[in-house]
Image (cartoon, rainbow, N blue to C red):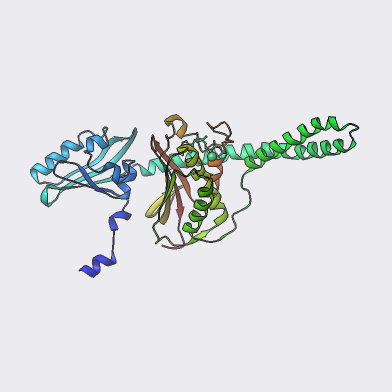
Amino acid sequence: MNAERRATPNIQEHLSTAVALLDEQGRLGYMNPAAEILFATSARQAAGQSLEQLAPGADGLGEALRQALETGAAYTERERRLLINGQLMTVDCTITPLAGGHALLELSQLDRHLRISREYQLIAQNKATRELIRGLAHEIKNPLGGLRGAAQLLERELPEAGLREYTQVIIHEADRLQTLVDGLLGPHQPPQQGMVNIHEVLERVRQLVRAEAPPEVAIVRDYDPSIPPFRGAADQLIQAVLNVVRNGLEAVGEQGRIVLRTRTQRQFTIDQTTHKLVARIDIIDSGPGIPAPLQDQIFYPMVTTRAQGSGLGLSISQTLVNQHGGLIECASEPGHTVFTLWLPLEDYP
Ligand SMILES: Nc1ncnc2c1ncn2[C@@H]1O[C@H](COP(=O)(O)OP(=O)(O)OP(=O)(O)O)[C@@H](O)[C@H]1O
Ligand SMILES: [Mg+2]
């Protein structure tokens, strides 16, 4: 029995159903990762809170819990609508009273598929916009080379050194445009396929950003070492993760915390394909968060709120992850912003 237990550790950590344990006062104790996602909080933050505190929109659930505890009978409700963190969702809900006045809460989200198809639309739109911008960027790129070359030739012929100031302006501005256009063109080569260890990718990113980050920004690792290697392009994934982590760094400023967390998830749908096993990489920052109206737009190219930003970082990351059959999603509230990269581990059922 014990050996069996040891052989199957932490099954609840891998469930797609949200599972939470409540004490006799209805306060939260344990939460599995699916519950953390559903309530958009961490188990640590939620510990000791009541359901009403955690999800004010989940009214009636607390009442159902009290009834289940009083009567000792399990409570089940199908297709219940819940408003959690401003997000309306449909769940199947079960409350099971346990010994010692505790109760087990299970919520399985039904509209994950609906949400995915919305994500799918977002990706399709993103692709269309990218194609348009890519076409435009190409058109700019060629004359730009000519312009820069001509300015260089002109510079050599100039009779007075003082006039170089003007050709330098042309060359400098052409270079700036070139950088922008290269960014807009984005990654074009098909990914160099190899076997990727996601933790090597994350460690490389951590090294890079550690050097840039202010000393009072903690970069915390929380890895699931069981994630198998998968087919992909390490360099491109480093770029994809780096863009997201750099945004996190910019968001937290001089002080804060960035967590790099990895987990696996079974039976997960991305872009209308259900995968047996996917890697989930959460990049969590303690910054001020992304205003709700902006959240739908940040993956589009040239959407930025930063004076020095080009607004290309996330769009490039999304493209790179899409090329790996994956998806980046974002959930944000003040103090807790999570970018989740989903990557299929297809070859390893
Ligand atoms: N972790 C985050 N916290 C708060 N806002 C964020 C976060 N990540 C992204 N954003 C918002 O999304 C916008 C777009 O991000 P994106 O990385 O695409 O562009 P950028 O960072 O502005 O410019 P760059 O091309 O240099 O990366 C940002 O300007 C910022 O407003
Ligand atoms: Mg950025």
Residue 98 appearing in the image: yes
Looking at the image, which is closer to me, 152 or 115? 152
Screen quadrant of the C terminus: bottom left
Q: Residue furthest left?
A: 71
> Where is residue 222 shown, x and y percent of the image?
39, 53
Q: Nearer the viewer, residue 54 or 75?
A: 54
Q: Nearer the viewer, residue 278 or 35?
A: 35
In which quadrant of this rendering is ligand 2 seen? top right
Give me the residue at 13% from left, 39% from top: 66
Which x, y percent locates residue 38?
A: 32, 43
Count of labels in the image: 0
Judge left or right: residue 252 versus residue 73: right
* Rendered residue at 20%/34% (across/down): 60
Residue located at (51% from left, 51% from top):
205
Q: Quadrant of residue 137 in the image?
A: top right
Report whether residue 274 is seen.
Answer: no
Q: Is residue 311 above or below residue 268?
A: above
Position of residue 158 measured from the top left corner of the image (x, y, whole percent): 89, 33
**Residue 348 figure quarter:** bottom left
Residue 302 picture location, percent across and down: 58, 34
Q: Quadrant of the N terminus?
A: bottom left
Q: Is residue 159 left or right of residue 314?
A: right
Horizontal side of 97 relative to 334 (left or right) equals: left
